[in-house]
Image (spheres, rainbow, N blue to C red):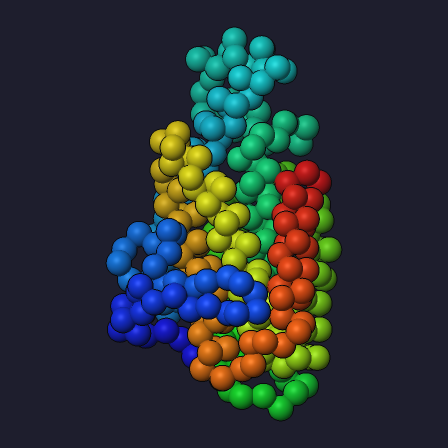
Amino acid sequence: MMFSKSLVTRRTNQMIKLKSTGRAFSTSSTCSTSDTVTTDQQDNGKQDSFNYTAIRNEIMDYWMKNEAASPQGTATKARYCCFTLHDARQSYLKTDANWHWLDRELSSNYAGETGAVHIYKGAICALNLRSTDPASMEFCTTHMATESEHLAMFEKIVPKGKRTILIPIWKMAGWTLGFLPTMIGGSKALYVTVEAVESFVEEHFHEQIDPLTKEEACPELVKLLKHCCEDEVHHKEDAANQLLKANENLDSWWIKPWSQIVTVGSKVAAEMARRI
């Protein structure tokens, strides 16, 4: 079930607590650029509204500046003022080119969106094997469509040479993370898992948005990251809302440790995607 815009507006300042996880949920998120949270249905098709050429150029320029400032960047620094866009692209796309902070973060984003799509694929497979309510299936199909849009966005701005080589592992891990909890614990376990994953993802995006905003760097990229972050916040809040609507017992012993396992696993996986 999706949030309606009026529902989100009414609940803007309402805090929803899951007692067993110790986390709070609010529809007023730091990722939001407006007073209300836009639903996934309203966001569909927005991927075509971004200037991907400008974003790619921003990323290359950011890479060049970091390359010139690095200990190995003496030669690059000497030539930087004379570089054309073609020169920058050639250097940036070299298979042995250095990965700087933003390259590592974007690699992690690409891997994360890949994993997210496969989480929902695994969950849908489990739901098809169980007798379940239609809301759970709608939850998965709707959010998977949004994650697929995010993945398509990052495919347009992250070149193949700047993507983690662990994508097959991310696909398998994501599918398993969606399938096993849902198969064992049904929709309740699915919602708890999604809430934990998306809580981490929100923090992960802010680790990029905040420093780039402070530097006043890559404004078009920041716009895209904020858009993705808003969607992830909605997924987190939708999962919490579904738990409350179903009157699930939130004191179950397994919720807190499982949420912690998912959070730690997400952090480890994101760090691996930055390095390999």
Please provide percent x and percent y for residue 178: 65, 70
In the depicted structure, whether residue 186 falls above or below residue 228: below
Q: Is residue 179 left or right of residue 22?
A: right
Q: Is residue 91 visible?
A: yes
Q: Is residue 147 visible?
A: no
Q: Is residue 94 left or right of residue 228?
A: right
In the depicted structure, whether residue 48 falls above or below residue 67: below
Quadrant of the rendered structure where residue 74 is? top right
In the depicted structure, whether residue 207 falls above or below residue 57: below
How many numbered callouts?
Answer: 0
Quadrant of the rendered structure where residue 103 is? top right
Q: Is residue 144 left or right of residue 41?
A: right
Please provide percent x and percent y for residue 134: 51, 87
Please provide percent x and percent y for residue 22: 53, 63
Please provide percent x and percent y for residue 250: 56, 76
Identify the image quadrant of the N terminus. Answer: bottom left
Residue at 63% of width from left, 27% of height from top?
A: 98
Residue at 42% of width from left, 69% of height from top?
A: 16
Residue at 46% of width from left, 62% of height from top?
A: 24
In the depicted structure, whether residue 18 falls above or below residue 108: below
Identify the image quadrant of the C terminus. Answer: top right
Q: Nearer the viewer, residue 60 or 204?
A: 204
Q: Nearer the viewer, residue 111 or 232?
A: 232
Residue at 44% of width from left, 13% of height from top?
A: 81
